[in-house]
Image (cartoon, rainbow, N blue to C red):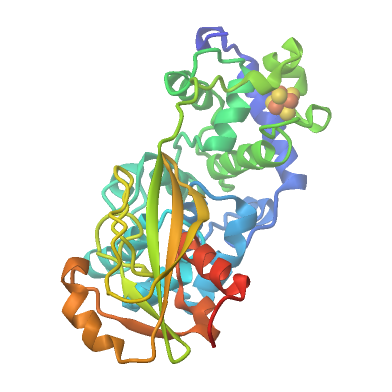
């Protein structure tokens, strides 16, 4: 159905979703619970911003431990701004989409240096922050400041698309979903944060009840209003465009080991996994295979197709070439490093490699090599 059919029912739906939240809100470390909201308490914008950036493309279950770790290391935005980027990236390792971590750090520095450490309270001003897009600006404005903003994340998109059986395939259907969410969103009035609580109520229902597969419609507070449920086919919504096949790229990582240490480099600051520590590689990229050439001459042992990793727009198959040396590699590396930019060697003890903050892709390769028991110790 089209959004033109959305009727006066929206007020009922909003009331039922809001009432359900009072007793069923998930306790999350960045969240103000409904009874606190009723007393006019708002969450710390730093917590809301940090959690929302972490939650982009990532589940709540994966984010909680990272959020707690970040808050323990950097309790305030000033602490985060003062941190070294390398430490922030290392703490982020495993969460993926590393540009988020670099933007997070940049944004913290901007807020501290340009805004005296205070988050702006309006969607328009939040949008000016580095790395803050339309969704994040709306979520922070609504949840941290109680402003009326239309919040549509993937969970809300699914819930709303089903409630009104919006048939237009994504991404075109996003416009109708947004109009419907606008019709559902309450006004910002009274002491409690009605707008922020409503957005979070919808997120919770989307995450726990109106799930992508096998939605638990019998537990849903708005089942009686749901057009997709009445049609008997909620999983058809939101209607997705046909999937494109992902290209497969080939890459090669180089395992260079000496005296129980592994040679790592820092990736270039721009591009995929920028500024992260990683194994040297053959410059694979989203748009091309790597060149396959090792950075040093020597007796390399090749482990083919050791790791497969899926990125949003392509898949990567990785060979790992292994080289154990008992001579001083630093000199050789200096002579051969030209093709590797200014990637200074970082010799990291293999025993503590888990602490190096390697992106998941590289950590998978390391674990595969260590797990193979083929090291010459
Ligand atoms: Fe989702 Fe089912 Fe509720 Fe409809 S009734 S909103 S499909 S959980």
Q: Residue furthest right?
A: 218
Quarter of the image that includes the C terminus: bottom right
**In the displayed structure image, the side of residue 355 where residue 118 appears, left or right:** left
**In the displayed structure image, the side of residue 291 where residue 7 appears, left or right:** right
* Viewer-nearest residue: 168 or 188: 168
Residue 215 picture quarter: top right
How far across and how far down the image is residue 254, in percent?
38, 69
**In the displayed structure image, the side of residue 272 where residue 142 appears, left or right:** right
Give ligand 1's quarter of the image. Answer: top right
- Who's the residue at 71% across and 48% down the image? 25
Q: Is residue 163 visible?
A: no
Q: Is residue 345 visible?
A: yes
* Viewer-nearest residue: 162 or 317: 317
Residue 13 picture quarter: top right
Q: Residue furthest front?
A: 299
Quarter of the image that includes the N terminus: top right
Q: How many marks?
A: 0
* Viewer-nearest residue: 182 or 134: 134
Asked if residue 87 is positioned above or below residue 109 in the image, the reply reads below
Asked if residue 372 is positioned above or below residue 16 in the image, the reply reads below
How far across and how far down the image is residue 266, in percent?
31, 72
- Who's the residue at 66% across and 41% down the image? 207
How far across and how far down the image is residue 191, in percent?
57, 48
Asked if residue 51 is positioned above or below residue 88 in the image, the reply reads above
């Amino acid at each position: 159905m089209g959004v033109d059919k959305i009727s006066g029912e929206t007020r009922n739906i909003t009331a039922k979703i809001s009432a359900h939240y009072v007793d069923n809100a998930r306790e999350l470390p960045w969240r103000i619970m409904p009874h606190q909201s009723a007393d006019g308490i708002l969450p710390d914008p730093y917590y809301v911003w940090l959690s929302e950036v972490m939650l982009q493309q990532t589940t709540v279950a994966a984010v909680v431990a990272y959020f707690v770790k970040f808050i323990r290391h950097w309790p305030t935005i000033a602490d985060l701004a003062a941190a070294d980027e390398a430490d922030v990236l290392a703490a982020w390792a495993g969460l993926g989409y590393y540009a988020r971590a670099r933007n997070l750090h940049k944004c913290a520095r901007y807020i501290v240096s340009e805004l005296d450490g205070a988050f702006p309270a309006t969607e328009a001003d939040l949008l000016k922050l580095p790395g803050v897009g339309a969704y994040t600006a709306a979520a922070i404005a609504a949840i941290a400041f109680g402003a009326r903003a239309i919040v549509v994340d993937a969970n809300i998109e699914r819930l709303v698309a089903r409630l009104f059986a919006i048939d237009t395939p994504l991404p075109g259907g996003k416009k109708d979903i947004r109009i419907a969410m606008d019709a559902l969103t309450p006004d910002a009035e009274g002491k409690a944060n009605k707008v922020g609580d409503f957005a979070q109520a919808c997120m919770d229902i989307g995450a726990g009840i109106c799930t992508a597969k096998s939605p638990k419609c019998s537990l849903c507070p708005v089942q009686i209003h749901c057009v997709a449920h009445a049609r008997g086919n909620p999983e058809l919504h939101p209607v997705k465009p046909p999937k494109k096949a992902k290209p497969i790229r080939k890459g090669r990582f180089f395992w260079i080991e000496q005296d129980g240490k592994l040679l790592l480099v820092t990736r270039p600051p721009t591009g995929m996994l920028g500024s992260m520590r990683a194994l040297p590689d053959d410059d694979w990229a989203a748009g091309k295979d790597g060149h396959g050439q090792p950075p040093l001459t020597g007796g390399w042992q090749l482990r083919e197709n050791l790791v497969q990793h899926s990125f949003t727009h392509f898949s990567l198959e990785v060979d790992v070439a292994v080289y154990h040396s008992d001579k001083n590699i630093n000199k050789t590396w200096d002579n051969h490093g030209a093709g590797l930019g200014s990637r200074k060697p970082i010799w990291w003890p293999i025993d503590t490699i888990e602490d190096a903050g390697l992106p998941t892709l590289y950590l998978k390769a390391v674990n595969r090599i260590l797990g193979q028991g083929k090291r010459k110790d």
